[in-house]
Amino acid sequence: MKKLFALALALCLVFALFACTANTDDDPNTTTAAAELVPFDLVAFRTAAEAAVTMEEVADLINLLEDHPGVLPDEALLVYEAALDRVALAVMMEAWDLDWEWDWENNIFHGVAFADMDLPPQFLVMTGLEGGGPCNGHIFIDYEAIEQSLQGQLSESAVAWLRLMDYDTRNRIADDAALIISWDELATRMLAWEAFERAHHPFVLALHEAEHRTTGWSQTLLGFYLLGIDNTPVFDWGPNTLLTQVRESYERFLADDANRSSEYFSIVEEAMAIWEANDWQFTYDFDRSPDTVQGQLIALLQLESPLIPRSPQNQQEANAPQHAHPPGCC
């Protein structure tokens, strides 16, 4: 009798184990959890990305990302985006070297019609007319297409970053080193990037480790806001006085209580005090001396945030970015 009981108990355990295994195989949550345990080979992916030299080769890297069964590490997205950016710049530079010429009669550039090229879906072309400036066409990364391709495989931070990049790409900040949005809009972009950097600190650190051009991007936008960019200074070149529209933008920024939580509120406040103390006159010299308005504003921009690290290329103040095309710049 005891032997029969033991046999029955053993059979029950076998059937129970089989049932648990079957349920595990059918449970999508368990399957997803198991997939997330599969590590992504970042080293191999980085090697493949660095080897890609054509638009087709770099676009095909998306297949390696899509084939991963779990959530991708943020670093993989940054490696992929950097490869897309590098190849897009190389294609544009090669085309411009061959076909770029200045039309003196119409005062515009004529070059390769990028819009007529058969580009992979990860790229888009925007012309100067769309951006509000003289660029006759630039190849940009289509961040919206990347998000759609990798839907469900990206971290919340990665999705937020892609959407910021996409907005700034389609609604450019500058063209030909000149501001093409209002000073108020520039401040809004600055605050949006600051909010992202505060809410997604691990992703910001990943940007910093990758030396990505958007590391500390809110601080770069602050530099644009306080000193302008190459072809759009904050002062009038004649009397060297602070432009009225810039001063009024600063005043609106400081009057908005919602901006008091920004790390940059006190910096804009100090900038206004510097201008007022100097009768709103911009003074400068080649040494950027601290007794000039230029030197004092630059000193404000050197303030480091413990939350928002800078990359080496973003240490330059008030210079239009020289990378392929940082978000919103052409």
Image: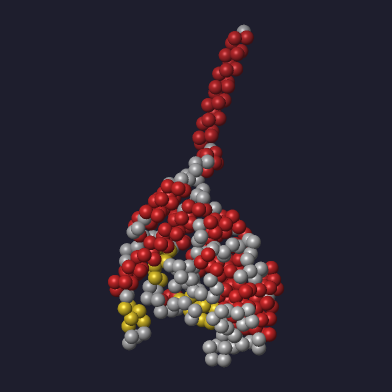
Q: Nearer the viewer, residue 169 or 282?
A: 282
**Residue ranking furthest to the top:** 1
**Residue ranking furthest to the left:** 98
Residue 113 visible in the displayed image: no
Examine the image and state in which quarter residue 195 appears.
Answer: bottom right
Q: Nearer the viewer, residue 13 or 41?
A: 41
Examine the image and state in which quarter residue 270 appears.
Answer: bottom right
Residue 194 visible in the displayed image: yes
The C terminus lies in which quarter of the figure? Answer: bottom left
In this rendering, position of residue 203 left or right of residue 92: right
Q: Position of residue 179 (x, y in %)?
A: 50, 78
The N terminus lies in which quarter of the figure? Answer: top right
Q: Nearer the viewer, residue 228 or 25?
A: 228
> How many numbered circles does the render carry?
0
Residue at image x 43%, y 75%? Answer: 130
Q: Position of residue 320 (x, y in %)?
A: 49, 74
Residue at image x 59%, y 55%? Answer: 202
Judging from the image, the colouring scheme is: secondary structure
Q: Position of residue 94 (x, y in %)?
A: 32, 68
Residue at image x 55%, y 30%? Answer: 20
Q: Position of residue 174 (x, y in %)?
A: 48, 75
Residue at image x 51%, y 31%? Answer: 22
